[in-house]
Image (cartoon, rainbow, N blue to C red):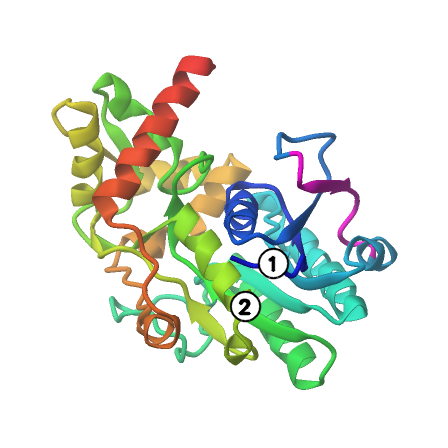
């Protein structure tokens, strides 16, 4: 338990930002959250600011007094190239002005297809997609800022995530809501391939651990996930919690690509289809060897997530 009263600043109040908030509060840190929304429900002890994270003048003010800054922002999927780099640049300026560590949340798009080879942190950035190339350049920008001494950086990367509040993830509402009433969970790609899924609270804890450990700086780390199983097996575990027979509906690739021609969001989903057409195994060995394994057992994580989606559905 921390007793120093250190201030930690979180940009982004989505599922990952809120998981970081919860972990920081558990550890006794002061927390300031920054987003663009009018209001969100947070504990009274959390300071909440609203503003434009692309504005360096604003982020310098928002980061005043911070020891660690977390970038948990995630702009609309269809607007990554124009929105994401400026967000990161603004947050980096804020952290640098405060002399704070910058812990950045990333996915693994920058690696590109690996033909089923496990994803490790030493893979080259070989993205073949627009969003993957954006991710790769943003990671390079962070490491350049670190190497030049502008700001101390560590990066946490995770696979497709699931958990409380994770509605729009690949393992979000399309996978968890239908089983509540016995309907088929919807997936893209081949459900019988191995695929790593990462639990949101484990991401939050992993990012905070990176913020606490100076030896994490200057590197990217794959945050721990529970065991990798096939998407079908993952869905069967969901149905075990709902007590209905397991049903899986794989959206045909041809239909997805047809929809992509007319629907911008489907176009972005189709671009990442390769992740679901080959084994997708995110290796977190380096993190575990350095900091320990904080991954929640998959059965427990899915049980909590099903309970949250059931409550969400009942309150709609």
Which region is colored magenta?
44-55
* Neighbourhood count class around disc 1 (C-alpha, 10 Å): few under 14, some 14–19, many 20 upward: few
Tell me if residue 13 comes above or below residue 140 in the rendering: above
**Looking at this view, is 185 or 42 the one in front?**
42
Mark 1 vs 2, N-terminal side? 1
Camera-side mark, 1 or 2: 1
Task: Identify the residue shown where x is 35% and y is 22%.
Answer: 310
155 or 101: nearer the viewer: 101
Name the image quarter holding residue 97. bottom right
**Residue bearing the label numbered 2:** 212
Q: Nearer the viewer, residue 147 or 277?
A: 147
Gap in angstroms between the C-alphas marked 1 and 2: 14 Å
Label 1: which residue? 3
Residue 48: in magenta span: yes
Residue 177 shows in this picture: yes
SS at circle 1 = loop
Q: Residue furthest bottom?
A: 148
The residue shown at (32%, 35%) is: 304
Left or right of residue 240: residue 306: right
Q: Does the CB distance between marks 1 and 2 fall below 8 Å?
A: no
């Amino acid at each position: 338990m921390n007793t120093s009263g250190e201030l930690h600043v979180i940009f982004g109040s989505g599922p990952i930002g809120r998981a970081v908030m919860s972990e920081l509060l558990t550890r006794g840190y002061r927390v300031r959250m920054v987003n663009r929304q009018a209001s969100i429900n947070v504990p009274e002890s959390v300071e909440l600011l609203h503003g434009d994270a692309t504005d360096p003048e604003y982020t310098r003010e928002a980061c005043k007094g911070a020891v660690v800054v977390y970038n948990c922002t995630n702009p609309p999927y269809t607007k990554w190239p124009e929105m994401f780099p400026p967000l990161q640049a603004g947050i980096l300026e804020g952290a640098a002005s405060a002399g704070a560590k910058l812990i950045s949340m990333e996915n693994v798009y920058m690696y590109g297809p690996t033909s089923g080879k496990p994803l490790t942190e030493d893979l080259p950035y070989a993205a073949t997609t627009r969003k993957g190339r954006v991710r790769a350049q943003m990671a390079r920008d962070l490491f350049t800022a670190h190497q030049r001494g502008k700001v101390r950086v560590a990066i946490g990367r995770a696979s497709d995530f699931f958990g409380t509040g994770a509605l729009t993830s690949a393992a979000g509402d399309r996978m968890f809501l239908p089983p509540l009433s016995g309907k088929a969970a919807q997936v893209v790609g081949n459900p019988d391939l191995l695929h790593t899924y990462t639990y949101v609270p484990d991401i939050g804890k992993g990012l905070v651990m990176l913020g606490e450990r100076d030896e994490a700086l200057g590197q990217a780390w794959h945050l721990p996930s529970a065991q990798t199983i096939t998407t079908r097996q993952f869905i069967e575990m969901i149905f075990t919690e709902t007590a209905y027979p397991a049903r899986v509906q794989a959206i045909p690739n041809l239909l997805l690509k047809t929809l992509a021609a007319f629907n911008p969001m489907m176009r972005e989903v189709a671009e990442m289809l390769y992740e679901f057409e080959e084994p997708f195994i995110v290796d977190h060995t380096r993190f575990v060897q350095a900091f320990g394994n904080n991954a929640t057992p998959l059965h427990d994580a899915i049980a909590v997530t099903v309970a949250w989606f059931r409550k969400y559905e009942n309150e709609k």
